[in-house]
Image (tube, rainbow, N blue to C red):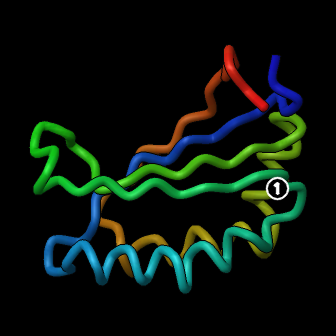
Amino acid sequence: MSEFTAKRIGFLIKRSEMTLDEFTRHWEKIHAVLCQKLPGLRRYSINIIDRGKYPRVAYDGFSELWFDSVEAHDAAFFSPEGVALLADIPNFVSDLCGVVVTEKQFIWP
């Protein structure tokens, strides 16, 4: 069982005028820095998808954010840091689908 009870996954499609490198650079150098400031965030990762290699995949990447609870997740996104994070999304993303999931771990260090 996960030590965190709330995990948010965001499925992202880059802006059409951006290259994958530009999208990745913005995500790593700007958006991820903002995301790391979210109060209560326990773990964070981004995953880049090369749609040239995997053309059937509908997304250019996905993020994973772990929180201790759904309440902690909600508080983070309503905080000033969360508002700043959400305001940055249109700078590099044309579409984002965010979901809070139940993670079931089978092999985990």
Quarter of the view holding residue 21: bottom left
Q: Nearer the viewer, residue 105 or 11?
A: 105
Q: Position of residue 4 (x, y in %)?
A: 84, 33
Per the image, label 1 sits on a secondary structure element best described as: loop
Residue 13 in the image: state x and y as whole percent.
29, 57
Residue pictured at 55% horizontal, 84% vertical: 30
x, y percentage for residue 1?
82, 16
Which residue corresponds to the image point at 68% horizontal and 69% vertical from the top-left? 35
Residue at 69% from the left image edge and 36% from the top image edge: 7
Specify whether 28 is left or right of 44: left
Q: Residue at x 60, y 73 (%)?
A: 32
Q: Amino acid at mark 1?
A: Leu
Picture quadrant of residue 15: bottom left
Q: Is residue 20 above or below residue 61?
A: below
User: Residue 76 at x, y = what percent?
Assistant: 80, 57
Is 101 or 83 nearer to us in this picture? 101
Crowding around mark 1 (Cα neighbors within 10 Å: few <14, some 14 to 19, many 20+) is some
**Which residue is nearer to you in this view: 49 or 100?**
49
Q: Is residue 95 above or below residue 21?
A: above
The residue indicated by pointer 1 is 41
